[in-house]
Each structure stands twice: as structure tokens, then as C-alpha cells.
Image (cartoon, rainbow, N blue to C red):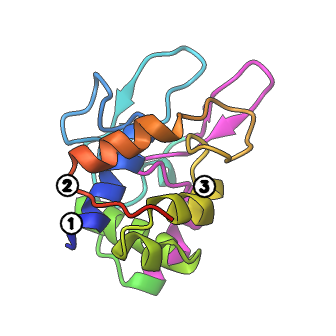
Amino acid sequence: MKKNRKAFLDMIAYSEGTSTSKATKNDGYDVLVTGIDGIPEIFTNYKTHPFMTRMPKQINSHGLYSTASGRYQFLKKNWLHYQLLLNLPDFGPESQDRWAIQLLKECGALYRIDRGNFNGAILKCHYLWASLPGAGYDQHENKYSALLAVYKESGGTSILV
């Protein structure tokens, strides 16, 4: 995988809190959304999206439920579409990476990532992950400067635009 792509994926996992989860045993690929109880949880069966066989988790006191799973916190409602589109054999790490790259391609961020335009890439994909700056989901958003630092630490290059 190209170094900027890998670095950007690492940055998303950091931003979503999966790669830094105390519970993960697989760099965030095994992390389930944290529920209202605040207890981190993982899954071990990568055969399919974990919420295909379990109920969504309540994530706040306002009755919001989620099925976010894996390193990039993918939702169950999108699993079958991307599984078919990308011919994903499972919900394992390689499949999760391929799915994330596809989303970045679809929103126009991948071109910018490949050219080192970190800011432009964030602007194109921020709505896909609630933790990115400018996402606007009324959830915690990470600071641009912190995410750029993680991206660079992971080997990504950035141009000023």
C-alpha cells in the first residue's frame, strides 16, 4: 500500500480511537463501538460484520444506537453493499482497509492523499468519520494539528495548499 494511504488510514484509526483502544488485540480491526456503559469491547470472528449476528449498541442517553465496527468503525447497513462491490471475503483487516480506501476514492479524497494534500483530503472525507474536524455530527472532533502529526508519524507526506 502506498505510504500516504497507509498513513491516512492510521490517522483515521487514531481519530476514531480504535487503534489506541485499551481493548484491541489487532490494531483496532477488532474494536466495536463503545456503548453507553463506556466499556470497550472487541470481536474475534472476522467472518462477517459483527453486528450481523448481534443487536446494535446504545451509545448515548438519547436513545442513539450504533453498529460501528472495526478499525474504521463501519456500519452494518453498508456492509453488504461494499462486500459485494469489492468482493470482500470477510470483515478481516485487509477487507476493512480495502473498504476504507474505496470510501476515500468515492468522496474524492484518495487523489489528494496520494499527492500529499492532507488538508484537501480531510475536507473531502470529514463527513465520513464523526471524529474528523468539521464532521458536524455533534460528537467529539479531533484537532486538525493532532491528526496531521499522527499522519506524519505514520510516514505520510504533506504539501502546503
Figure check: 116 above or below 74: below
Label 3 neighbourhood size at 10 Å, few (<14), some (14-19), many (20+)? some
Identify the magenta region: 55-84
The three-letter amino acid code for the residue at tag 2 is Gly
Q: CB of mark 2 within 8 Å of CB of mark 3?
A: no
From the image, tell me which residue sits under label 3.
Answer: 126
Q: Is residue 59 magenta?
A: yes
- Res. 137 image quadrant: top right
Label 2 neighbourhood size at 10 Å, few (<14), some (14-19), many (20+)? some
From the image, tell me which residue sits under label 2.
Answer: 155
Return the residue nearer the eye: 146 or 36.
Answer: 146
Return the residue nearer the eye: 13 or 45.
Answer: 13
User: Disc 2 vs disc 3: which is toward the camera?
Assistant: 2
User: Can residue 61 be seen at all in this image of the molecule?
Assistant: yes
User: Can residue 77 be seen at all in this image of the molecule?
Assistant: no
From the image, tell me which residue sits under label 1.
Answer: 3
